[in-house]
Image (cartoon, rainbow, N blue to C red):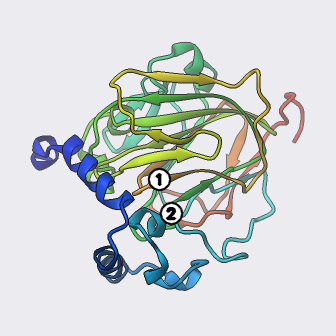
């Protein structure tokens, strides 16, 4: 943990982002080949399995999958990413469980806006960690209309399970992009959490959100636009991966029985069922 605090994370991330976004010919191919072997990346699932066809490391890292590689389950809520469940369950008051002995507030997570966080008091959350080998595009868990996006500056600690157990308030102190939706079954929030080496995060409606990193909270409101995404649609991607935190109000989602901390999950698998409709009635 001491190394995490001493590491020049911003500088390292900027350097990694610059390398990952630049076409470097054989050097890029060599790095991709090493990465695939090191982490066991399943290139057989990729729409383009030939690593020599990727001009940049970012092109490889955000690679598309073959059609049908992630079939969508028949469920009200789908897992938005490949990864492993870090934690999930009830929000206790405004406290979200990070790891044993550590929690953080919903207000801190969304960038300090208590009115935005208030509907999620005593609600439910799920945190999914994306490892280096995983598919790094992020998809919609259900139909939703975009309401607001917030870029919150912060640290760039690693978000692997060891760091999650050792750095207090990790997900509410790292740089993050907060996406607020009005969904088919009620409002929900998806938080894309940055980490060391995460060069940037992007959404389909905005493009790359960071950089720039001005050091202040930035907001975009979409109430005068109609940006609607269907369940399973891509909504964003990590250019070098990290973690997604989902927030739901009380009595909105019942997580699938097989969802538990530390289980591997795939984009499109059933995450949960709706406990009520968007109008507050039966699902």
Which quarter of the picture shows residue 266? bottom right
State the image coordinates of residue 201 (x, y, percent, origin top left): 46, 46
State the image coordinates of residue 77 (x, y, percent, origin top left): 72, 51
Q: Is residue 124 left or right of residue 58?
A: right
Assign a secondary structure to mark 2.
Answer: loop
- Of all residues, the one furthest to the top in this rendering is 115
Q: Is residue 52 left or right of residue 91?
A: left
Residue at 69% in and 25% down: 222
Q: Is residue 10 left or right of residue 50?
A: left
Relative depth, front residue between 273 and 230:
230
In the displayed structure, would residue 49 be above or below residue 266? below
Q: Are marks 2 and 1 in contact (CB under 8 Å)?
A: yes
Q: Is residue 13 left or right of residue 218?
A: left
Callout 2 crowding tier (Cα within 10 Å): few <14, some 14–19, many ≥20: some
Assign a secondary structure to mark 1.
Answer: strand
Disc on res. 238:
1
Residue at 33% in and 76% down: 35
For disc 2, the marked residue is: 62
Q: Earlier in the sequence, mark 2 or mark 1?
A: 2
Measure how far apart labels 2 and 1 are at the Cα level: 7 Å
In the displayed structure, would residue 119 be above or below residue 127? above
In the displayed structure, would residue 36 be above or below residue 221? below
State the image coordinates of residue 160 (x, y, percent, origin top left): 32, 55
Residue at 46% in and 74% down: 54
- The C terminus lies in quadrant: top right
In the displayed structure, would residue 241 be above or below residue 88? below
Which quarter of the picture shows residue 129? bottom left
Relative depth, front residue between 176 and 122:
176
Residue at 43% in and 55% down: 239
State the image coordinates of residue 208 (x, y, percent, origin top left): 50, 43
Callout 1 crowding tier (Cα within 10 Å): few <14, some 14–19, many ≥20: many
Disc on res. 166:
none
């Amino acid at each position: 943990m001491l190394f995490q605090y001493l590491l020049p994370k911003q500088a390292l991330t900027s350097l990694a982002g610059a390398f990952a976004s630049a076409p470097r010919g054989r050097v890029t191919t060599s790095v991709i080949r090493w990465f695939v072997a090191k982490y066991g990346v399943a290139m057989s699932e990729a729409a383009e399995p030939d690593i020599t066809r990727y001009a940049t490391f970012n092109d490889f890292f955000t690679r598309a999958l073959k059609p049908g590689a992630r079939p969508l389950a028949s469920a009200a809520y789908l897992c938005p990413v490949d990864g492993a469940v870090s934690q999930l369950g009830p929000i206790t008051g405004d406290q979200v469980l990070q790891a044993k002995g550590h929690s953080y507030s919903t207000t801190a997570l969304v960038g300090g806006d208590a009115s935005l966080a208030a509907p999620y008091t005593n609600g439910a959350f799920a945190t999914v960690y994306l490892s280096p080998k995983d598919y790094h595009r992020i998809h919609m868990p259900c139909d939703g209309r975009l309401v607001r996006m917030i870029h919150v500056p912060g640290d760039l600690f690693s978000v692997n399970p060891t760091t999650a157990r050792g750095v207090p308030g990790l997900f509410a102190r790292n740089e993050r992009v907060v996406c607020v939706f009005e969904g088919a079954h009620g409002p929900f929030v998806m938080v894309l959490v940055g980490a060391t080496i995460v060069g940037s995060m992007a959404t389909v409606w905005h493009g790359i959100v960071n950089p720039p990193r001005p050091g202040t909270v930035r907001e975009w409101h979409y109430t005068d636009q109609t940006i609607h995404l269907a369940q399973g649609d891509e909504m964003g991607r990590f250019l070098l991966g990290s973690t997604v935190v989902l927030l739901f109000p009380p009595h909105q989602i019942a997580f699938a029985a097989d969802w538990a901390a530390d289980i591997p999950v795939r984009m499109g698998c059933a995450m949960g069922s709706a406990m009520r409709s968007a109008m507050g009635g039966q699902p």
